[in-house]
Amino acid sequence: MESTETFQALLPEEAQTLVAVMKRIVPHNDATLQELVWKTAMAYDAQLVAHVSTRQEVRKNLRELDMQARQTHAKPFAEIPPDTQDAMLKTIEDTSFFQSLVNATISDFYNRYAVWTALGYPGLAQRDGAGYLHKGYDHLSWD
Amino acid sequence: MARPMLRVPLNEPADVVVIGTGAGGGNVIRELCLKGVKVVALEAGPRLDPDRDFEEDEWVMFHKLSWLDPVIGEGPDMTGLPAWICQAVGGTTTHWAGAALRFQPHEFQARSTYGEIPGADLDDWPLDLDSLAPFYEEAERALGVAGRVLPLPPGNTNFLVMQRGAEKTGWHAKPGFMAINTEEYDGRAACTQRGYCFQGCRNQAKWSSLYEAIPKAEATGLLDLRPNCQALHINVDSQNRVTSVVYARADGQWEEQKARAVVIAGNAIQTPRLLLQSVSGKYPHGLANGSGMVGRYYMRHVTASSYALFPRPVHAYKGMTMMGLVDDFANNDPEVRHFVGGFHLETIMLGPSFASVFIEPGPGTSTPNRRALWGKPLVELMENYTRLAGLWIVGEDMPQAGNRVTLHPYQKDQYGMPVPVVTYHDHPNDRAMREYAWSRARELYLAAGATKVYDTPPYPATHNLGTCRMGHDPSASVVNEFGQAHEVKNLFIADGSIFTTSAAENPTLTISALAIRQAHYLVDLMMREEL
Ligand SMILES: Cc1cc2nc3c(=O)[nH]c(=O)nc-3n(C[C@H](O)[C@H](O)[C@H](O)COP(=O)(O)OP(=O)(O)OC[C@H]3O[C@@H](n4cnc5c(N)ncnc54)[C@H](O)[C@@H]3O)c2cc1C
Ligand code: SF4
């Protein structure tokens, strides 16, 4: 299990909220994929270290989201049920904060080898240069 | 073995200074050096080694290759990142997919064929297909175009799906003309269907000037290539002749290279930027811009994509990223379609990360009104990644005077050069074409058995055209049919900015043919001592 303590730009509670939001952006049921969201959250946190103005903006938005969850549902955002989380995110989905977060999350998450493997994409195996020439590039299994 | 590298002293005029080493620059450089002309090539980006530096990673390669210095986009149809262009030796031919199509004859006569279209300033090109045909042939030999000088590419699974749909709808899917080695050619290896064409081809099977034109020119001993050098200003004398190019080295140091002639090939955003920035007493509105046309008529094709989910696996990422096409809509048929000009459907596939970002994109990568896919609908798409097929729509867009490249009044880049501002809005003809093309693509995929079809909006512009228009009339265009500036006889432009209209075809083969034709003309002028 990863820990929020390893984050550098975000405080532990903010990091909890971030991971919870990211899990709703890419809500795969697969447990391995769920765990990998931590890696993406940490990569995002690392980027915020150098970008002070974005960091302030992100922290403000994460704290607001958490506060609202506590006010309305008496629990931190990270602990309310997924459907309720989704409903809350729906209300902010067109904000630039959320749209940028989606972009950052998916471009990192779906570029991870472990995610590729889980999706059945053998991109990593392409380093050798042999290609799909003899590996079914011209064969549709449904023909 | 290559001869020792040429070093032209700064104060000794180079025969020709070429700015940019992509499709236009690369072809000019090769032809000039092979004919014995001494060339200094300035390239803003680094020189990468395909084997060492190309990686199977979309973002890593995007960051290694792209022009990431600021470019400001304006207008309702502008994408968050305005254009996808490279900054590297080889230019955007490192990223490109390799589709190498010739124009159709009528596309050189857009104004005569389509008539007066309100809001668009159509014009006929100052040359026709017959005069370009021999140079198309030369370009096809140089680039190694499959279907012309090599066997046609075999169909990958993405193509087989397209073909299945086309058979059911009565259209025709066929392997396209690709500048990709379907067998060993010109000392470069054959394609092994690795499917990383957009990331740079490590096999060097897909043509790039990085490993074709540049090394051939270097082998003559007549090329002085200067990577990491950005041209900032072009100087002229009182006789309207270009005399030198001021440029910045990577360390920020400025240099000035004397030149007998200058060829600019910086792509359709950077080329007008450099001209507009090169202000002098004679040219208060920018070099060669007496007509006020520099920067105007920016075009980027009518583009969009269609991705479809199938019940069974497709594995469309296998094999050439782009290789098959449907040409049934490439002709001009306004009676039936209610818009002028045509478009092609071309197979395309993105890796998982680009697929998640671009198939239903947000405002950061698409237009401001877009909402990125997230949550369950995104998971549905991505868990079915291997069942996706995809195609790209590319068609002719209308030249509009308001679509243009200008200089930002005060924002500057790291060398103090004004940042370019690119403005674009769709013409009603463009919108009608895109809607029509989306619905044909949907029809095709549904016929092939798709369960869901995504209408994907344009990516950041990959085909950037038209900002230094070619024409007969010096008051309405910037260059003549050879890409020679009307006002400055030893100044040439060799990239997509000289396109009079955009035509429906991917532009690079035409850029290459025009560049080769220009190089021949330039050498002729030099032989006759008219330069
Ligand atoms: C992902 C992708 C796929 C594509 N697929 C296809 C395809 O299948 N078929 C097709 O026909 N086209 C395709 N294209 C488009 C194709 O790459 C371009 O049309 C072509 O490369 C343009 O050639 P160019 O000479 O105008 O500019 P470029 O190839 O972009 O070269 C311009 C060069 O000039 C340099 N430069 C600019 N300004 C300066 C300066 N001031 N000083 C020094 N150097 C400078 C740049 O760094 C760059 O290297 C694709 C493009 C992309 C991004
Ligand atoms: S599919 Fe062929 S052309 Fe494309 S990158 Fe791979 S080897 Fe090169």
Image (cartoon, coloured by chain):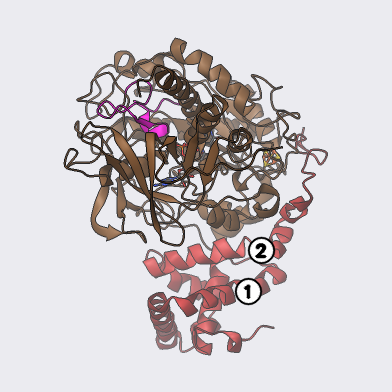
Chain colours: A red, B brown
Residue marked by disc 1: A39
Could you say whether the residue bearing mark 2 is in a helix, strand or loop? loop
* Residue type, mark 2 in image: Arg
- Quarter placement of the C terminus of chain A: top right
Residue A59, horizontal then vertical, whole percent? 42, 81
Residue displayed at 49% across by 36% down: B39
Residue A44, horizontal then vertical, whole percent? 53, 73
Residue marked by disc 2: A112
* Mark 1 neighbour density, 10 Å: few (under 14) some (14–19) many (20 or more): some
Provide the major secondary structure of the magenta segment: loop
Residue B424 seen from this side:
no
User: Is residue B483 shown left or right of residue B473?
Assistant: right
User: Is residue B430 shown left or right of residue B102?
Assistant: left
Instruction: Name the chain letter of the residue that bears numbered label 2.
Output: A
* Residue type, mark 1 in image: Lys
Q: Which residues are magenta?
A: B480-504
Residue displayed at 27% across by 16% down: B115
Foreground residue, B246 or A21?
Answer: B246
Residue displayed at 57% across by 26% down: B34
Image-quadrant location for residue B220: top right
Whether residue B462 is in magenta: the answer is no
Foreground residue, B67 or B8?
Answer: B8
